[in-house]
Amino acid sequence: MAQKGFKAPQIKLSPSERERLVEFARRRKTGQGLALRARIVLEAAKGATNVSIAEKLGTTRETVGRWRSRFSTDRLQGLLDEPRPGARRKISDKKVEWILTRTLESMPRNATHWSTRSLAKSCGVSHMTVARVWKAFNLQPHRTETFKLSTDPLFIEKVRDVVGLYMNPPQHAAVFCVDEKTAIQALDRRDPILPLSPGRAERHGFEYVRHGTLSLYAAFNTKTGAVLGKTVRRHTSQEFVAFLERLVATNKRKREIHVILDNLSAHKTKKVREFLASHPRSPRHARLSSSSRSSRSSRNRRAAPEGSRGGGGVSAERKQGRFARRIDAEKRDVRSSGLQSSSFCVWRRVPQRRTES
């Protein structure tokens, strides 16, 4: 009596499984082993036998039967490689804890931070062991980052004012981020520049001649992306006011202009305040005292007291009191000139009320 042969399991694919298998078989970055398994299952779903699949794909019948059975049992997960045990870990958890403790709570002698080799020598392990522990716990002793904390008591209110201006700008208004680059060296090469030629880049001499310095003013329109720039020889409030006048002249008369600045001393002079009072459609926004310039908001610090730099042994209560008195004084000056506050430190001109006799 003839012995019955092994009956291969029938393969039926769902639309999602078929799509995933086709992706495995066609994607260039897929491993060839996984791609072959996907092709085996796709051929099996068509009703082909193990022998015909092996002949078509250039593999053995045993390989086809193995992956066909695994897919029938575990579906797509069965086609992936199982995790391999590898060699056993030679260092104990106590040793790993000791490496982490030394890294986080101690410093080497005559060095600013641990290296893999110095810590390995201190802990009695190899430098590759230290490197693997650091990688597992995402430790990078050689790297340092900086941070900046603001001492401004009204920091949150000012951030809301400036960020709100970026996120939700007023209608029919232009928002400009204004900044300057000072002390740009105007250099000229002493030797003539050699032009570009095939196989050789443009070349210039090493020595140069200085022609003084320049300052660059730039206003970035946050909506259109247009940049208005101007270079000046000096960097004072007079040149800054001239740049603001040019900025106002390039916009329509009825359009309100919002200007966001940093805390430079040239932005807080009497000339600048007089210019803003005479141009009601050009409000500027609250300056953030002692804030970091690394955030790209180029923040204006309108209400900060002039010359306030923090520190110096002055208590936080005295700083806050001086700050509040400065704000009240500025508001009184602005109200007396016919301006009113529509939001924090954003001033617009209003018509004077006529008094009836």
Image: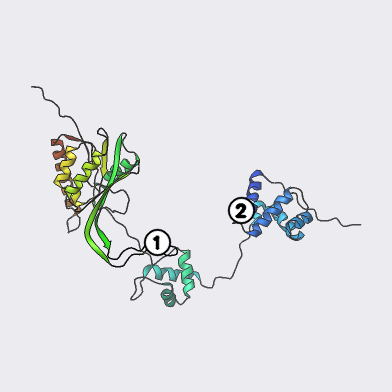
Horizontal arrangement in the rendering, residue 115 relative to residue 187 (left or right): right
Which residue corresponds to mark 1? 196
Mark 1 or mark 2, which has the lower sequence index?
2
Q: Describe the element under mark 2 as helix, strand or loop.
A: loop
Q: x%, y% of residue 134?
A: 45, 67
Q: x%, y% of residue 283?
A: 23, 39
User: Which quarter of the rendered picture does the C terminus lie within?
Assistant: top left
Horizontal arrangement in the rendering, residue 341 relative to residue 200 (left or right): left
Task: Assess disc 2: are there few (<14), some (14-19) or many (≥20) residues with their C-alpha within 10 Å of its C-alpha.
Answer: few
Looking at the image, which residue is at 17% across and 41% down?
275
Horizontal arrangement in the rendering, residue 169 relative to residue 323 (left or right): right
What amino acid is found at the position of numbered circle 2 in the picture?
Arg
Which residue corresponds to mark 2? 27
Horizontal arrangement in the rendering, residue 26 relative to residue 100 (left or right): right
User: Which quarter of the rendered picture does the N terminus lie within?
Assistant: bottom right
Question: Depth check: 118 or 60 in front?
Answer: 60
Distance (Cα) linking label 1 and label 2: 44 Å
Report the disc number at residue 325: none
Compared with residue 323, is residue 192 higher up or lower down, i.e. above or below? below
Question: Depth check: 157 or 348 in front?
Answer: 348
Q: x%, y% of residue 71?
A: 69, 53
